[in-house]
Structure formats: structure tokens, C-alpha cells
Image (cartoon, helix red, strand yellow):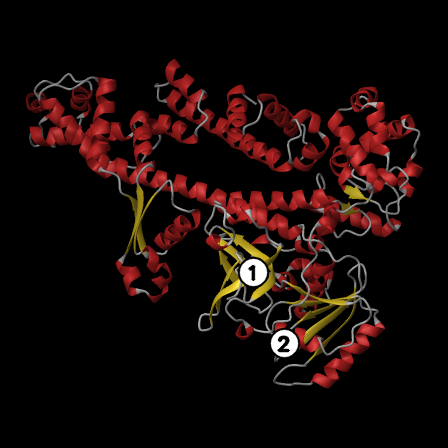
């Protein structure tokens, strides 16, 4: 990668040049983001996966820019206009906008007024004005009068069109105007279609809207741009035409010299025309797109963080689970699952109106609880959830069995998907949906990877943002979470395995097929026997795969096989062995290592101190799950409906979604309440994510309940009730 790009990325991300250079080199070698962030820390200086992913993004951006430069240089070269100075400017560009500005005069364009003027032979007259050589424009224009140019005024008008186009294609002028526009206000006003449409009412607060572009919250900008696309709003930048014209004229004079006499008036007319007809629409659009890109990145960042928290929700674990997908007329769908999430039994009960067959339903549930040894009950939080929770209070639960509420977001999407059809080809969508609810309680990560994150109810304006960037962020987040947790090689579904670094869908299927044929893996090394899984794929994936009952205890840790010899040498130098790791008798490992000397040990083993620390951490807790320290899912609420809520009531709830202007909290009444950003904390925060995350268990107080609109306003700033 070129040094100019390395320096730019380093400055952009507050990294050292060598960190970026090493990352780029590792990418060229085919290394994945999770592998680099976990097992190449010495080369990256301990960069986390988010930082490595950012570098990867910009490496890809500049790879595309390099291709674009080749195209641009070729086009300008073929036009015979490629000077050494212009080539140097293009090759040193790190801004796509600057690059396109340099290319603009040669970029193929549709027919314009300037094109027509050139066809009339008026370019020499425009050159006189442009170069300040015309003292008397009217006299200079007369030789151009002819059959198609009736008089000097028409000739000058055509020449001004050419000058105006040149002004609009001047890089310095365009960048100066961008700087002005970025400091102005974005404006929105209602269109006739918006005034006449009931659908536009949701945008009423933007019908006459003005706010400085550099201060507008991303959700406001995305909302007005969506309304513009729907034809309900007219959106622009309120740039001052007079000041912008003065800036254009100044830039022109700095480059070309101050025009004298009548030529000055001709240039000023061309400047006014260039701004109104060419520059204002173009720069306004560019600056709004630039602002939208910033808003997109912020919205996507929030979506990614919400997704990370949701995927890393603490699992209840391998328990025999009864999953209930509640409903009224169509009944409550029940699926009983074993410890691995396999379907044991399913049925439908009708405890709610219109059937009201409560006695039969109680008997059926009681029989299933006993017959299948149920240890946990998961109830979906959709329609009839509160009534089903109330119904389950009448049931005698086995000792230790608890009832949990589980988000249903995306369950219906999953139940009708190809993934669900492959898992349960003989079951209908209702059974698949219930199974998904139960599995979400047992292991959220393993189940949620099967669903498009956009269907999980945790985004904000996800359909309005850049879909390519969104896909990149969400897929990267899922991959990061899967690899951070680690995957049981002998039980993971192919959908979960596909997100392990270096594997992908095809190899995941091969792994499952091999596992089925051989009865499971006994060591990580056995992965090399899987068809099409070569040394590079093994290097990338092995450290993230776990074998809990394998022959080698290290196969159930995050220690990479490439470090097994060093790990055994470490233990040997401290008078320990793998047997001590297996039976947990190495609790004083850190003290022993400190006594020996960490730097000395790392040097003797030929590894870095960061890698040594990671190995020690894994040896102390083999088979650990990073999610174990997180809050468990919330138990069922004692509330039943929104009508049970009263002002000032203090409740415990689960954060379901975090957006720019607040937090949605599930308090167990089927309708999430909103905590506005101003009600989260007394300290100033720019974004709710500074205080809370998806999945957090929080205490809230009811501010207001709007029964008609089914809106609940909450605060996290609890106040004593008077």
C-alpha cells in the first residue's frame, strides 16, 4: 500500500504508521480481522477488532481509489491534457472529492449551454475573457457574429456560458464553496404534495425547519432527507449568494488576474450565473450527501453497538426449555427442547379468548413440564404475552424452573426462512418460531446469527442509510461477536460456524458433514482432514473453535495451536503441566510468572509479552464464556398491561433499543417505554450509548402514559414520590 494512504489512515484513526502498514500487509496475506486482532497483537500494537476493521475499510477504499486514479489518468492522457503537475496532484490525492474535482473538466458530460457555445466557435472569445486579454468585450465579440450568432450580445452570452462552466469546474472554487456551505443552515419546507398528504403528517415538525448543518442530529437529517425522497419536503442549504459570488470572483482573480474594463463586468455576470445555475445545486447536493454520509456512519455505528450488545446477551445455558409463542385465536404454540436445543415435542394450547380452554391447557402444560424435565420457560413478548405470563402463574413449576420473557423480533422472519426450512423441513412456521424463542433464551448468539440483523428491532433509519456500509458493519459485528465468544466445534450449527474466521458457508457445511460422519472432532488438528479446509483456513479458524471434551485441554481454550509448544514450555518452566490446567490447580500461575519475570519468560519462549498475557489468561479459565459475567435475561414482570401503569411508578426493565434521541425499555407490558436522552442521566451526554446499552437491566420511573397513542414516557432519573 502506498505511503500516502498509510499516513492518511494513521492520522484519520489516531494510529501509528507502522500499525496501519502491518495491518495492510496482513490483509494482503489473507488474514481475517478476528485473527489479526486476537493473534497478531504484537504486529498491530494490540489493536482491537473494531480498529482493525476500520483499517480494513480504509484499505479497501483506497484500493478502489487507486483504480479510479488509473482510469482518470488514462482519460486525461488521451485528451492530451495530462501535465506533470496535474499527474502529481492526482497521484497525491487522498480525498475522493478532491480527485473528482481535478477530473471534472475532462469527465464526459451531457450536452450543456457551454457545449453549444463551443460548437458556435465562441471558445476563443471565452479565452479572452478568462485570460483577462479583453479590454473591450463588445468589440472583441463582433468578429464572432455570423449566421448562427446574430449579434455581439449573443456572442458574449455564449462566451459567458463557457466561462461559467469553467468556474464551476475549478477545484479551488468548489472547495471554498463547500467550506462556506458546511457552515450554513440546512432548510426544509413543505411541498404541495406534503400539504395535501395525510401520510406527510409524521414530518410536520420539519415543514418549516432550519438548523446549522454542523449541529443537526443525525436522526433529524435522515428524517428530512427521507421526506424529501418521498416528495413531502424541499431541502436545501441557505447559502448567501452575494458572499459566495464574491468568493468565486476572488478565487478567479487570484488565479487569472483581475480583469479590466468591461471584461470585469462580463466575468461577474458569468460568476453569478455559475453560482445560481451550476455551483449552488451541485455544492448543496454534495454537502448534503457528505452530511448524510456522516449521519449514516453514526446511525450504523449505533446499530452495530446495539447488535453487539444483543448478540452478547448472557445465555441461560443448556437447560431443557419450554418455549411458548403466545397468541389468542390461534392459541399458544409450545415447543419443548432438550439441552442442545433439539425439538422433543410441540403442541398448541388455547387458554385465552375466544376458546378459554384454561383447564385443559393447564393439564397439558403440567404434563409436559414433568415428562420432559423442563428447567426453564421462555415466553415470547408478542401478542398475548402478558396474558400467557399470567396463565403460567397458575402452573406448578418444577423446582428451580423459572419463567423468562424473550424478544420475538425477527422470529417470524426466521420461521419462514430457508434456514428454518432446512432445520425443520417437516414442521410449519408456528413450530419453528416457538423453537427460535426457546433457543434465544438458551444461547442468543447461536440463534440470532440466523436472522438478518435489520429484523431484530434494534436499528434506527436502517432503510435510509448506505446499505453497503450497513451490511459491512453488521456482518463485521456478528463475526466479531462469534469469534470473541468462541464456538463449540462439535455442536455448532453451520450458520454459526460460517461466521468463524476463515470458514464461511461452504466450509461450515463440510465441517458439519465430517462431524456427522465421524461422530465428532477429538482435536483441533483433525480439522485439517475436512475437505477443502487447508492450512490457511486452519490458521485463521482454529483458535476460535472449542472442543470441551477433547484429548487436549488447550483445544478448549483461546490458545492458538501455533502457540501450543510455547504454552507447554511456559508450564514446564514453572513446574506445571497441562494436567494442572485441566484440574484447575494453577491458580498461582500469575504470581509464579511474576516471580520468574514476564519479560524474561517471553524472551525465552520467543513470543511477545501481549501473547504471553493472553495465553496465561486462557490457562486460568479454560472453556470460559465471556458472556457469563453479563446480566442474565430479565425474569417475567408482575405487570400485566399498559393500563396497570401509574405516574411515578418505579419499575425494572430491559433496554431493547438505543437510538440517537433516547432508549426504548421493555417493562413487561408489551409496549416499550421511551426514556428521552435528557431523562437518562443528570450529566451531559452526546449519545445514549455513553450511558446504556441494549440488554442492560435498568430502573425507570413512569413520567406519563398516553393510552390513546399507547405511548409510555419514562425517566432513569428516579425521584422520590411526594
Q: Residue at horizontal 67%, vertical 31%?
A: 30
Element assignment for label 2: helix
Quarter of the image with the N terminus in it: top right
Q: Pinpoint residue 56: horizontal percent, then vertical percent.
A: 59, 33
The answer to whether residue 108 is seen in the rendering is yes
Residue lying furthest top in this view? Answer: 84
- Please rate how many residues cluster around mark 1, counting C-alpha atoms within 10 Å: few if below 14, some from 14 to 19, many from 20: many
Which residue is at a point 63% across and 76% down the rendered structure image? 387
Question: Which residue is at the front of the view, 492 or 424?
Answer: 492
Does 279 appear above or below 369? Answer: above
Q: Is residue 383 above or below residue 107?
A: below
Q: Residue at x 54, y 47 (%)?
A: 689
From mark 2 to mark 1, how far is it between C-alphas? 23 Å
* Left or right position of 191 against 400: left
Q: How dense is the environment of label 2, judged by Cα within 10 Å: few (below 14), some, or many (20 and up)?
A: some
Residue of label 1: 700
Residue position marked by numbered label 2 in the rendering = 387
| Rendered position, 581 above or below 703 | above
- Residue 687, relative to residue 645: is it above or below? above
Element marked by disc 1: strand
Quarter of the image for residue 336 reads bottom right
How far from the left and from the top, in percent, is residue 684?
48, 45
| Earlier residue among tags 2 and 1 | 2
Give the side of residue 27 with respect to residue 319, left or right. left
Give the number of the mark in front: 2 or 1.
Answer: 1
Q: Which mark is residue 213?
A: none
Q: Are marks 2 and 1 in contact (CB under 8 Å)?
A: no
Q: Residue 28, position in %: x, y?
A: 64, 27
Q: How many marks?
A: 2
Amino acid at each position: 500500500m502506498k505511503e500516502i494512504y498509510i499516513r492518511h489512515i494513521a492520522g484519520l484513526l489516531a494510529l501509528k504508521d507502522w500499525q496501519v502498514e502491518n495491518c495492510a500487509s496482513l490483509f494482503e496475506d489473507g488474514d481475517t480481522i478476528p485473527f489479526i486482532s486476537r493473534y497478531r497483537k504484537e504486529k498491530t500494537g494490540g489493536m482491537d477488532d473494531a480498529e482493525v476493521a476500520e483499517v480494513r475499510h480504509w484499505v479497501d477504499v483506497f484500493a478502489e481509489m487507486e483504480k479510479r486514479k488509473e482510469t482518470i489518468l488514462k482519460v486525461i492522457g488521451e485528451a492530451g491534457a495530462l501535465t506533470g503537475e496535474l499527474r502529481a496532484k492526482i497521484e497525491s490525492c487522498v480525498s475522493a472529492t478532491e480527485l473528482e474535482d481535478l477530473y471534472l473538466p475532462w469527465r464526459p458530460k451531457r450536452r450543456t449551454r457551454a457545449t453549444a457555445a463551443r460548437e458556435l466557435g465562441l471558445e476563443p472569445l471565452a479565452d479572452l475573457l478568462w485570460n483577462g486579454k479583453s479590454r473591450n468585450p463588445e468589440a472583441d465579440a463582433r468578429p464572432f457574429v455570423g449566421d448562427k450568432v446574430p449579434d455581439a450580445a449573443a456572442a458574449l452570452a455564449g462566451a459567458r456560458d463557457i466561462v461559467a462552466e469553467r468556474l464551476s469546474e475549478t477545484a479551488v472554487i468548489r472547495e471554498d464553496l463547500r467550506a462556506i456551505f458546511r457552515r450554513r443552515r440546512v432548510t426544509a419546507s413543505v411541498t404541495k404534495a406534503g400539504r395535501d398528504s395525510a401520510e406527510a403528517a409524521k414530518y410536520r415538525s420539519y415543514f418549516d425547519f432550519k438548523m446549522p448543518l454542523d449541529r443537526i442530529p443525525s436522526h433529524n437529517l435522515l428524517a428530512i432527507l427521507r421526506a424529501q425522497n418521498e416528495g413531502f419536503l424541499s431541502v436545501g442549504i441557505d447559502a448567501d449568494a452575494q458572499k459566495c459570488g464574491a468568493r468565486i470572483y476572488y478565487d478567479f482573480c487570484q488565479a487569472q488576474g483581475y480583469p479590466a474594463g468591461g471584461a470585469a463586468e462580463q466575468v461577474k455576470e458569468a460568476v453569478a450565473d455559475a453560482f445560481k445555475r451550476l455551483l449552488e445545486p451541485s455544492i448543496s447536493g454534495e454537502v448534503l450527501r457528505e452530511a448524510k454520509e456522516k449521519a449514516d456512519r453514526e446511525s450504523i455505528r449505533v446499530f452495530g453497538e446495539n447488535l453487539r450488545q444483543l448478540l452478547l446477551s448472557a445465555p441461560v445455558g443448556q437447560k431443557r426449555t419450554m418455549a411458548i409463542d403466545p397468541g389468542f385465536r390461534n392459541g399458544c404454540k409450545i415447543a419443548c427442547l432438550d439441552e442442545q436445543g433439539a425439538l422433543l415435542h410441540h403442541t398448541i394450547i388455547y387458554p385465552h379468548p375466544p376458546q378459554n380452554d384454561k383447564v385443559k391447557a393447564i393439564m397439558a402444560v403440567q404434563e409436559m413440564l414433568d415428562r420432559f424435565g423442563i428447567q426453564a420457560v421462555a415466553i415470547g413478548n408478542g401478542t398475548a404475552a402478558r396474558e400467557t405470563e399470567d396463565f403460567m402463574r397458575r402452573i406448578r413449576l418444577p423446582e428451580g424452573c423459572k419463567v423468562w420473557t424473550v424478544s420475538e423480533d425477527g422470529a417470524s422472519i426466521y420461521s419462514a426462512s430457508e434456514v428454518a426450512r432446512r432445520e425443520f423441513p417437516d414442521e410449519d412456521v408456528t413450530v419453528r418460531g416457538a423453537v427460535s424463542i426457546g433457543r434465544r433464551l438458551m444461547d442468543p448468539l447461536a440463534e440470532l446469527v440466523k436472522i438478518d440483523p435489520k429484523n431484530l428491532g434494534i436499528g434506527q433509519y436502517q432503510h435510509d442509510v448506505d446499505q453497503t456500509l450497513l451490511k459491512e458493519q453488521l456482518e463485521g459485528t456478528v463475526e466479531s461477536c462469534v469469534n470473541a465468544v468462541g464456538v463449540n466445534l462439535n455442536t455448532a450449527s453451520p450458520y454459526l460456524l460460517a461466521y468463524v474466521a476463515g470458514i464461511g458457508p461452504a466450509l461450515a457445511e463440510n465441517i458439519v458433514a465430517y462431524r456427522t460422519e465421524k461422530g465428532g472432532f477429538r482435536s483441533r488438528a483433525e480439522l485439517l482432514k475436512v475437505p477443502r479446509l487447508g492450512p490457511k483456513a486452519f490458521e485463521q479458524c482454529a483458535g476460535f473453535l472449542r472442543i470441551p471434551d477433547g484429548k487436549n485441554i488447550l483445544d478448549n481454550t483461546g490458545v492458538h495451536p501455533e502457540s501450543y509448544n510455547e504454552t507447554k514450555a511456559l508450564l514446564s518452566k514453572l513446574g506445571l503441566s497441562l494436567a494442572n490446567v485441566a484440574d484447575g490447580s494453577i491458580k498461582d500461575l500469575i504470581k509464579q510468572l511474576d516471580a520468574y519475570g514476564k519479560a524474561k519468560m517471553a524472551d525465552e519462549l520467543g513470543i511477545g509479552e501481549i501473547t504471553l498475557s493472553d495465553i496465561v489468561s486462557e490457562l486460568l479459565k479454560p472453556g470460559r464464556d465471556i458472556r457469563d459475567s453479563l446480566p442474565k435475561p430479565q425474569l417475567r414482570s408482575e405487570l400485566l398491561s399498559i393500563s396497570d401503569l401509574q405516574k411515578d411508578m418505579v419499575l425494572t426493565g430491559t433496554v431493547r433499543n438505543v437510538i440517537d434521541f433516547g432508549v426504548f425499555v421493555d417493562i413487561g407490558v408489551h409496549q416499550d417505554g421511551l426514556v428521552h436522552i435528557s431523562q437518562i442521566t443528570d450529566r451531559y451526554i452526546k449519545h445514549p450509548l455513553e450511558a446504556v446499552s441494549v440488554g442492560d437491566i435498568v430502573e425507570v420511573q413512569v413520567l406519563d402514559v398516553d393510552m390513546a397513542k399507547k405511548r409510555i414516557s419514562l425517566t432513569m432519573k428516579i425521584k422520590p414520590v411526594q
